[in-house]
Amino acid sequence: MGMHVWAVRLAGITLLLAAGLVFVACGDDADDGTPTPTAAATQPSGPATATVKVADNSFTPSVTVRVGGKVTWDWSGSQNPHSVVGTSANAKELIKSGVFRGGNGTYEVTFAAPGTYDYQCGIHGAAMSGKVVVQ
């Protein structure tokens, strides 16, 4: 065989090896067929903050925040005394405001774990209740 044939074969082998390296570099580290998670899949969902409006005898019924998000209860529209207390097992120690009277005041809680946190007014009970969903 002439020198030209060997050069063509060598070039073909080099291309095959390069293509193989590119294929291997694009795969994930596991050989189980599952794709490697992307950064978008691990990003928190939901807003970072939410506000629950406390009116006379009602709360905003439900708000959603991401893990690490903060919820603020705002008594700016309420003239009656109200408080907020956790009622679900995960909320009892976390959500405990004092009593707010006269239409002013805020109470904030930061949620570190996902879940649904049920709460109600400590004065009016289940008739005035809501929940925080943490994603």
Image (cartoon, helix red, strand yellow):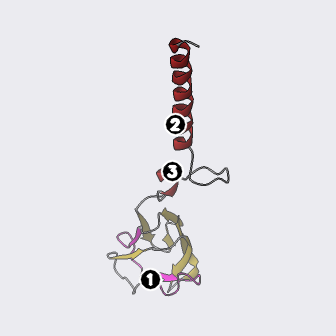
Q: Which residues are magenta?
A: 70-95
Q: Against 25, is 97 above or below?
A: below
Q: Is residue 83 magenta?
A: yes
Query: As drawn, is 98 to the left or to the right of 27?
Result: left
Sequence-first tag of 1 and 2: 2
Q: Residue furthest right?
A: 32
Whole-percent x, y for residue 95 in the image = 46, 82
Most prominent secondary structure in the magenta stretch?
loop
Q: Which residue is mark 3?
A: 38
Whole-percent x, y for residue 60 in the image = 49, 66
**Residue 22 numbered mark, or none:** 2
SS for tag 2?
helix
Give the class, few, some or many, for how many residues have Cα within 10 Å of label 2's Cα (few <14, many ≥20): few
- Foreground label between 2 and 3: 2
Give the class, few, some or many, for how many residues have Cα within 10 Å of label 3's Cα (few <14, many ≥20): few
Sequence-first tag of 2 and 3: 2
Q: Residue at x 47, y 67 (%)?
A: 67
Distance between mark 1 and mark 2 Cα atoms: 62 Å
The three-letter amino acid code for the residue at tag 1 is Ser
Q: Which residue is mark 1?
A: 83
SS for tag 3?
loop
